[in-house]
């Protein structure tokens, strides 16, 4: 969500620290926080004023009207405060319907004042601007400030002046206080804007001769602005609403959400509840909660939450195991229910997310069976058949009852099954993949219900050219009496305000998309672009709808895509100006910019007059920035779809990004040609569910838009409803509203005033909100009712009263749509037409592979590392385990080189080998080459490579050769003397024997260190002993013919491989044969070479030239003459 409530203490600290005003703000930072753990001695040391001042104490837990509830202690000394807290701290308290424990209190200095010195001030945000409310009589008895207060609206991007405040707000204030109040209110408004507040109320605001005192304060800030305000906010804590505890599991999921590009939400409502949900999608999660509550499950509903935005398998696993852990802590006498639901995904790979859930179910299968958990699953979207298959399989293998359903089942039908309100059907076997949708035949394109009216957005009949007749926007009582839900009228006086403030003169009713629409896509979203091109192809468009892409992080280039069976190139530009200049035919921009860059990029796009429509996909754009975009868009006549949206679709013409999902859903929902029904919703996932419902109950979708779940969508329900009203091909309209905001009332007004004449089927989700004891913020930022008129119940009743078709619940939405559609067909308003099968589109190789439809030999194979999952894996061992086990560099080398978890002593030996081979001075050939290269100005990699290329039999490469020679001699049964004599006879050097400097009298300490370790820790050293016997023979002839460090490591490593227990004899010999031992020297000496490179650069050594006097010039005599 965006707007989040902060504690009174946090709000006051922000104000005291950052307000800029000439008014004297008193008692700055005089706020002391008290909890059950408070140390009073320390508290009085930090706040000495507690010992000298009279005090006020009150709970700081988002409780309204504390004074009227008797929850404020006034004019007390410190001892009085402590006595007062004994009666209140950690005590159960009921506030409205919420029951909770008082555990967080605020102590402040008591401010003696008169009643006439109390004032009320409030600033809150709306779509059009920020409203400043002021009343000259503040305090506990302020009453209905909406009706009594002076009001001033500051338009978006406008400033507030002291003169405006004085003239419009302070008319009833004594003259001597006007200057102080005007300055303070302007400073408060600037603070409100700078720190991205969305709500800020002070009551009372006390103004005395000494200055201004902030007694009580309530505030909300836009949490999405954290990346802008972090320096000023710091780490803000957002307390839960009173009556709901803050659980560590909620914090854990919030942390996962913050670290993920996906959306992960969890709110615990009743941890002892029987009904648990794990729902995909912000809109769908609300619909499932509504349905559970409608069917009587409100008291047993344990949680609200959602996952969406294509979380990875690991993220879904972490989310699922948290839910399963919570629900298997306490048993319920009736057993428990887990509903794994969701709408039809647009782009989330259902199989991938379900694999994460399946992993969690397997991990918790014992507790799940012990707690008698039954699981109900319903999902659709990309690869959903495979997801449902693995979910069904885990039910069979674990013995947990899991009932699995796909898109053939209404989205919320599983709730009725779970709660015993409808039977659980026996499911026929499901298709294992989606290939059958992608190879269309005339039979698969049949419409099961009443057929559609026309194809490919051509005019339907001559009737369509003229405006449709005004139809009564209400169902006949006899036809839908069993569906409609009589409610008493709960619409408040706010409805009149909505009527007065709404007007239709500025509504955008132009055609957004056609078969010739061309778009630019901002962002390297190749999958979304390919989906758009495939949609264009099945719609029989002449040309792709995407003209170009803009991606600021690369240079201009071409990107390859498929157009049907052939490959095409689309241009990618670094900046928008070039793209606009070269593609003047483009009038739509689809922005996949991140939440941080979406504002700037959108403002840039609106500079170009050719652009009429912008879709903003990003979620989490600060509301203040969104309002600025809306203002500029209104001024320039640009329609914005979003933010926080999947986009929209016009069948047969154009689709935005991932809207409608993949081709299987496009074809199943018949989105390749227009129907007669247009819809508008907030939720992207629910818009795809509407595609499914409408395709099953009518002739299909004509146009559909998801305006986005944010509090201020760029375009409103009414904008699109009026556009649909004025489009002849659209015969009926479906609106899926939701809790929060008042836009649905404008639809009511449009129907009652006759501006909307076509049948409107409407349902507002979020009806469960009024049944919860404490406030719940649903998945969408805008899904929160701030007053009674914004509840879903109130809006549904108002729509019903206005004459819209309103079902009893979402469960019956499809029935209402079908009834209205059949009525229009019966009247002749809709004339069915013959289906035309779309052209076939080949399946992408990557998707076919994902579905398991094809196989292809891999270009190469690997068995040591896998980076594809959530966590890097070395030879089957997750990287977290590598560190947890403290395996060290030797252990990692064992995993990556030998695919074994080696014993501790073996890992230590490897590390010792790397240490002793790291360097041997600058004179050796490898170091020398590295130094010369570095001094020639070459880079690190080039210099390192130059040194490494010298490694061979003569320098450093003796490890492999020594291991092979000694092993062969030992294994063949040669005595050490026989081996020495044979090598001499053959005229070969014994590799690993001999040193230029060291001798039997001047031993190499590196060898001595390794020898001591090996003798102490290795279980057997047969080959090393053999080599040492050879050394005795060679040193008797010449003292420097010792077993050198290369030879020692070579033979000791063979002993290690053969005797550590991790390898067969053949495997040990194979590693020697393929050069593994030389790798030890290469890896170790690389450290030294890099050291020499850095040393030369640090010393700033110039180009190396070898001195003449160190070169012996030996030329042929006839040349030297």
Image (spheres, rainbow, N blue to C red):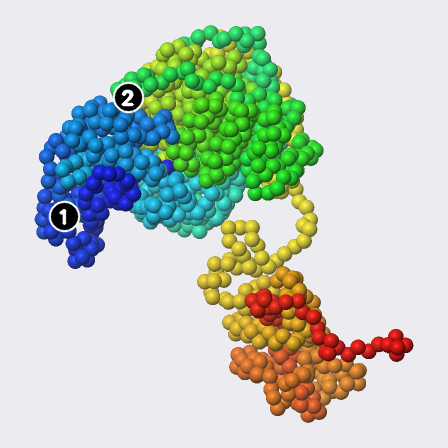
Q: Visible in this render: residue 477?
A: no
Q: Visible in this render: residue 851?
A: yes
Tell me the quarter of the image containing the N terminus: top left
Q: CA distance from mark 1 to mark 2?
A: 40 Å
Q: Is residue 333 left or right of residue 890?
A: left
Where residue 27 is drawn, which disc sits there? none
Residue drawn 53% across the image and 73% down it: 908
Q: Which residue is mark 2?
A: 494
Q: Nearer the viewer, residue 954 or 12?
A: 12
Residue drawn 36% across the image and 31% down it: 783
Tell me the quarter of the image containing the C terminus: bottom right
Residue drawn 57% across the image and 39% down it: 551
Q: Position of residue 506 (x, y in %)?
A: 42, 18
Q: Position of residue 59 (x, y in %)?
A: 19, 43
Residue drawn 57% across the image and 60% down it: 875
What element does badge 2 sit on? Answer: helix
In the rendered image of this protein, does residue 118 appear above or below residue 1082? above
Q: How many marks?
A: 2
Q: Is residue 593 left or right of residue 275?
A: right
Q: Position of residue 1005 (x, y in %)?
A: 57, 83
Which quadrant of the view contains residue 1089? Answer: bottom right
Q: Nearer the viewer, residue 896 or 807?
A: 896
Cβ–Cβ under 8 Å for marks 1 and 2? no
In the rendered image of this protein, does residue 1112 appear above or below residue 88? below
What element does badge 1 sit on? Answer: helix
Q: Nearer the viewer, residue 326 or 305?
A: 305
Precedes in sequence: disc 1 or disc 2:
1
Residue count near mark 2 (Cα–Cα under 10 Å), binned few <14, some 14–19, many ≥20: some
Q: Which residue is mark 1?
A: 85
Residue ranking furthest to the bottom? 1036
In the rendered image of this protein, does residue 681 appear above or below residue 962? above
């Amino acid at each position: 969500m965006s707007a989040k409530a902060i504690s009174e203490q946090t709000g006051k600290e922000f104000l005291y620290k950052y307000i800029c005003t000439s008014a004297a703000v008193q008692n700055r930072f005089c706020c002391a926080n008290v909890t059950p753990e408070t140390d009073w001695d320390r508290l009085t040391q930090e706040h000495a004023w507690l010992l000298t001042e009279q005090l006020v104490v009150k709970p700081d837990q988002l409780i309204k009207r504390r004074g009227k509830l008797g929850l404020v202690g006034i004019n007390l000394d410190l001892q009085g405060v402590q006595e007062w807290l004994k009666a209140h701290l950690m005590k159960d308290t009921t506030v409205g319907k919420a029951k909770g424990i008082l555990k967080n209190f605020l102590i402040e200095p008591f401010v003696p004042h008169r009643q006439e010195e109390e004032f009320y001030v409030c600033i809150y945000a709306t779509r059009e601007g920020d409203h400043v409310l002021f009343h000259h009589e503040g305090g506990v008895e302020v009453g209905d400030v909406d009706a009594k207060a002076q009001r001033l609206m500051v338009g978006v991007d406008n400033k507030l002046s002291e003169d405006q405040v004085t003239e419009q707000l302070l008319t009833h204030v004594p003259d001597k206080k006007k200057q102080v109040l005007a300055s303070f209110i302007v400073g408060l408004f600037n603070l409100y804007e700078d720190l991205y507040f969305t709500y800020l109320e002070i009551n009372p605001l006390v103004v005395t001769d000494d200055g201004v005192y902030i007694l009580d304060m309530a505030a909300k800030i836009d949490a999405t602005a954290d990346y802008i305000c972090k320096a000023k906010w710091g780490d803000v804590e957002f307390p839960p609403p009173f009556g709901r505890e803050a659980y560590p599991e909620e914090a854990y999921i919030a942390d996962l959400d913050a670290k993920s590009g996906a959306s992960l939400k969890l709110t615990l409502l009743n941890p002892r509840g029987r009904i648990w949900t794990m729902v995909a999608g912000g809109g769908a999660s609300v619909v499932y909660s509504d349905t559970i509550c409608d069917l009587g499950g409100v008291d047993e509903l344990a949680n609200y939450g959602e996952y969406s935005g294509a979380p990875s398998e690991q993220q879904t696993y972490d989310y699922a195991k948290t839910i399963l852990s919570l629900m298997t802590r306490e048993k319920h006498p009736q057993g428990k229910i887990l509903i794994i639901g969701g709408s039809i995904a647009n782009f989330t790979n259902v199989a991938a997310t379900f694999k994460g859930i399946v992993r969690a179910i397997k991990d918790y299968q014992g507790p799940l069976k012990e707690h008698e958990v039954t699981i109900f699953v319903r999902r659709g979207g990309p690869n959903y058949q495979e997801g449902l298959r693995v979910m069904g399989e885990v039910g069979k293998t674990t013995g947990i009852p899991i009932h699995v359903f796909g898109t053939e089942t209404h989205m919320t039908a599983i709730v009725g099954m779970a709660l015993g309100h409808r039977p659980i059907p026996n499911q026929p076997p499901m298709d294992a993949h989606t290939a059958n949708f992608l190879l269309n035949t005339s039979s698969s394109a049949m419409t099961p219900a009443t057929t559609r009216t026309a194809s490919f957005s051509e005019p339907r009949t001559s009737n369509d050219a003229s405006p449709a007749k005004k139809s009564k926007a209400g169902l006949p009582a006899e036809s839908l009496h069993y569906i409609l839900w009589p409610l008493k009228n709960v619409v408040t006086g706010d409805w009149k305000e909505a009527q007065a403030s709404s007007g239709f003169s500025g509504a955008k009713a132009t055609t957004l998309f056609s078969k010739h629409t061309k778009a630019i896509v901002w962002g390297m979203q190749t999958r979304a672009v390919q989906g758009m091109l495939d949609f264009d192809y099945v719609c029989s468009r002449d040309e792709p709808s995407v003209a170009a892409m803009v991606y600021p992080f690369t240079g201009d280039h071409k990107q390859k895509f498929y157009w049907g069976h052939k490959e095409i190139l689309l241009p990618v530009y670094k900046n928008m100006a070039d793209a606009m200049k070269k593609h003047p035919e483009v009038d739509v921009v689809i922005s996949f910019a991140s939440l941080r860059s979406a504002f700037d990029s959108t403002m840039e796009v609106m500079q170009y007059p050719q652009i009429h429509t912008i879709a903003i996909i990003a979620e989490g754009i600060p509301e203040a920035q969104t309002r600025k975009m809306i203002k500029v868009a209104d001024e320039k006549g640009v329609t914005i779809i979003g933010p926080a949206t999947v986009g929209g679709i016009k069948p047969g013409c154009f689709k935005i990004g991932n809207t409608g999902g993949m081709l299987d859903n496009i074809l199943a929902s018949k989105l390749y040609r227009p129907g007669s029904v247009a819809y508008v919703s907030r939720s992207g996932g629910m818009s795809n569910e509407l595609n499914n419902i409408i395709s099953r109950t009518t002739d299909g979708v004509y146009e559909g838009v998801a305006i986005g779940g944010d509090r201020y969508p760029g375009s409103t329900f009414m904008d699109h409803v009026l556009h649909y009203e004025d489009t002849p091909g659209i015969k009926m309209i479906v609106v899926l509203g939701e809790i929060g905001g008042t836009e649905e009332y404008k639809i009511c007004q449009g129907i009652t005033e006759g501006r909307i004449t076509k049948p409107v089927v409407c349902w507002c989700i979020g009806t469960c909100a009024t049944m919860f004891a404490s406030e719940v913020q649903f998945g969408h930022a805008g899904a929160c009712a701030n007053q009674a008129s914004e509840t879903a119940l109130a809006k549904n009743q108002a729509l019903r009263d206005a004459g819209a078709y309103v079902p009893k619940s979402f469960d019956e939405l499809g029935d209402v749509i079908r009834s209205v559609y059949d009525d229009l067909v019966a009247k002749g308003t809709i004339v069915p037409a013959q289906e035309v099968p779309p052209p076939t589109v080949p399946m992408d190789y990557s998707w076919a592979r994902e579905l398991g439809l094809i196989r292809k030999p891999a270009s190469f194979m690997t068995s040591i590392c896998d980076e594809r999952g959530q966590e890097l894996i070395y030879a089957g061992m997750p990287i977290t385990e590598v560190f947890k086990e403290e395996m060290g560099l030797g252990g990692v080398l064992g995993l990556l080189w030998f695919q074994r978890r080696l014993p501790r002593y073996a890992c230590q030996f490897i590390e010792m080998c790397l240490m002793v081979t790291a360097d041997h001075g600058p004179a050796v050939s490898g170091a020398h080459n590295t130094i010369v290269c570095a001094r020639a100005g070459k880079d690190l990699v080039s210099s390192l490579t130059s040194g490494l290329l010298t490694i061979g039999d003569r320098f450093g490469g003796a490890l492999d050769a020594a291991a092979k020679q000694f092993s062969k001699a030992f294994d063949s049964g040669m005595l050490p003397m026989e081996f020495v004599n044979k090598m001499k006879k053959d005229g070969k050097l014994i590799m690993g024997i001999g040193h230029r400097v060291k001798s039997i009298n001047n031993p190499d300490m590196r060898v001595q260190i390794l020898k001591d370790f090996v003798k102490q820790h290795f279980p057997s050293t047969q080959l090393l002993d053999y080599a040492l016997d050879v050394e005795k023979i060679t040193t008797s002839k010449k003292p420097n013919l010792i077993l050198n460090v290369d030879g020692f490591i070579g033979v000791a490593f063979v002993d290690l491989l053969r005797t550590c227990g991790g390898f067969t004899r053949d495997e040990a010999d194979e590693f020697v044969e393929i050069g593994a031992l030389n790798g030890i020297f290469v890896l170790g000496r690389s450290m030294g070479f890099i050291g020499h490179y850095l040393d030369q650069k640090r010393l700033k050594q110039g180009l190396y030239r070898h001195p003449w006097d160190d070169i012996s010039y030996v030329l042929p005599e006839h040349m030297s003459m």
